[in-house]
Image (cartoon, rainbow, N blue to C red):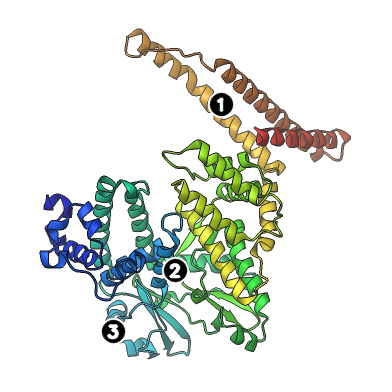
Amino acid sequence: MIRETVGHLRDLPRYRQILTTLVLYGYQDVVAALHLEGLVRPIERAALGDGVPPHDRARRLRLVFEELGPTFVKLGQLLSTRPDLLPEAYITELSCLRAAVRPFAFDQVEKILEEEYGRPVAEVFATLDPVPTASASISQVHRAVTHDGRVIALKVRRPDIARVVKADLDIIKNLAQLIERHIPALATYRPVSLAREFERVLRRELDFTIERQTIQRCRIQFARDSTAHIPRVYEEFSTPRIVAMEFIEGVAVDDIEGIRALGANPADVAVTGARILLKQIFELGFFHADPHSGNLRVLPGGIIAPLDYGMFGRLDSRIRERIADLLIGLLAQDTERVVRALEALDVRGEPLDARSFQRDLSELVAAYSELSLETIELGPLLRELIGFVRAHHLHIPPELVLLIRSLVTIESVGRKLDPRFDIARHLAPYLRALSLRRFHPYRVLSQTLRTTEDLRRIATLLPDLLGQSLDSIKRGEMRVQFDLQGFSRLVRQLTRASNTLAVGIVISGLFVASSVVLRDGPHPLAYIGFIIGAVLSVWLVWNMSRE
């Protein structure tokens, strides 16, 4: 039993430490539900943490994570971003884990630097500040000055963190399996899937090569944007355990007096920060997933300098368009459009009470039916949407959770700078652009061509597939049963699909033929062909979106 539970005997001391900590902070019921009481010593099994109120489970969970070290601190930080999973009290407590974490000793920092550079620190840097400027669960940052006068921020990974994280991740995945098996109330949240996602995120954060690539990518994306400053990476001082980047001075984004001292208007800074994040989300699909005030600096002129590139979200164009559909559907009081957007975003639950789901969603939609994109308050809307998700035990893709958290966070930061700040007003143009982009003639043409190619490939494979199926039927290896229920509906759908394809082919032919004619010089037939093709394209897209 023990071998099955812990996997390897070398993990037994760590298992005992984790379970004992849970018991000491009043989570005996969880340990008992997992049938792991035998790993906890009897004297500890009956104890409670000193000075911890028995009823305050949220605070006790935060203390458990703090007690268990970096991996669990990071787990608590990530859980604090999941209001779809945890009640508000837990989110509030676990958010405290984002504050400064206890730093490790400077002599360990020097040892890591000497191991990575292969020479004494004094030969690499003229000065190295022994007091860290920031300390987190995975790393800490020290200010250094090179011999040629460059000021550098050295992000140094904690010693032996890779080994500790690997052992803890194995235990967390094992405990997640036990939770799914023995605690039905928590099994609905798919803890095994959450553990795997946590492992993926944490392994990416441990790989400083990825963070350096992220910084370089952001520098390219904002190279022509004078309102954003992305720090420079110094590759000659960077290694798998060290990120060396330009040291950013500036002031904290929530330091209103400091911003004014720089000659900038706090309200303008709020708009700049929102515009940078919205551009990352809806134009680039690659956004800072942790834009809290500690990760943003303001430079002279109101320039925003984002810090810490360890956590970034990614959204492809399809997801961005579905997010636009979701918000526009809420404002248009179009429940069906909201449902389709949620399904397209893979927001779903099992089992689902369809009647109560439809009723609650209709009420949520009706609450915002009188508002426009310019007047809506995005924060309350997203929080109500999260509440709806939690009430129906729906599962949200991690990228969508990061998006919601980023929008709520940047709106909160903006409100501190300007009480009248409204991120929805700046969001509106991006949503409209995403909605209109799907009607672009080139996109309609490319979709039609892709559909034609898919049909051609299917038509090529169909004779062989049918021949093999008929041979299997003759040999008795396959049994065919016909069910004609809904056959007429299927015929109508196939007819509609074939008509849509035919119109798409006609549109493609008109555009191609008109282009060929126009290549030889202006001709009325070419312009007529373009006009007819455009009209048919609009009709086709409207008909497809309606269905």
Q: Earlier in the sequence, mark 3 or mark 1?
A: 3
- Give me the disc on residue 456: 1
Q: Are marks 3 and 2 in contact (CB under 8 Å)?
A: no
Name the amino acid, label 2: Arg
- Give the side of residue 387 with respect to residue 520, left or right: left
Disc 3 is placed on an element classified as: loop
Question: Is the residue 57 above or below the residue 293 in the image?
Answer: above
For discs 3 and 2, the disc positioned in front in the rendered view: 3
Distance between the Cα atoms at labels 3 and 2? 25 Å
Residue found 46% across the figure and 65% down from its top: 213
Q: Nearer the viewer, residue 236 or 181?
A: 181
Residue 355 place in picture, x, y as percent: 52, 36
Q: Give whichever of 488, 418 is nearer the camera.
A: 418
- What is the CA distance from the residue labelled 2 to the residue labelled 1? 44 Å
The residue carrying mark 3 is: 105
Q: Give neighbour class at mark 1: few <14, some 14-19, many 20+ (Cα, 10 Å).
A: few
Question: Extreme top residue here?
Answer: 474
Q: Residue 547: x, y in percent? A: 64, 32
Q: Residue at x 49, y 67 (%)?
A: 290
| Residue that extends furthest to the right in the rendered view of this protein | 524
Q: Image point 60% across, 23% down: which residue?
A: 493
Q: Which mark is residue 212?
A: 2
Task: Indicate whether 323 appears above or below 536.
Answer: below
In the picture, the disc for residue 83 is: none
Q: Is residue 70 visible?
A: no
Task: From the viewer's perspective, tell me whether residue 223 is left or right of residue 210.
Answer: right
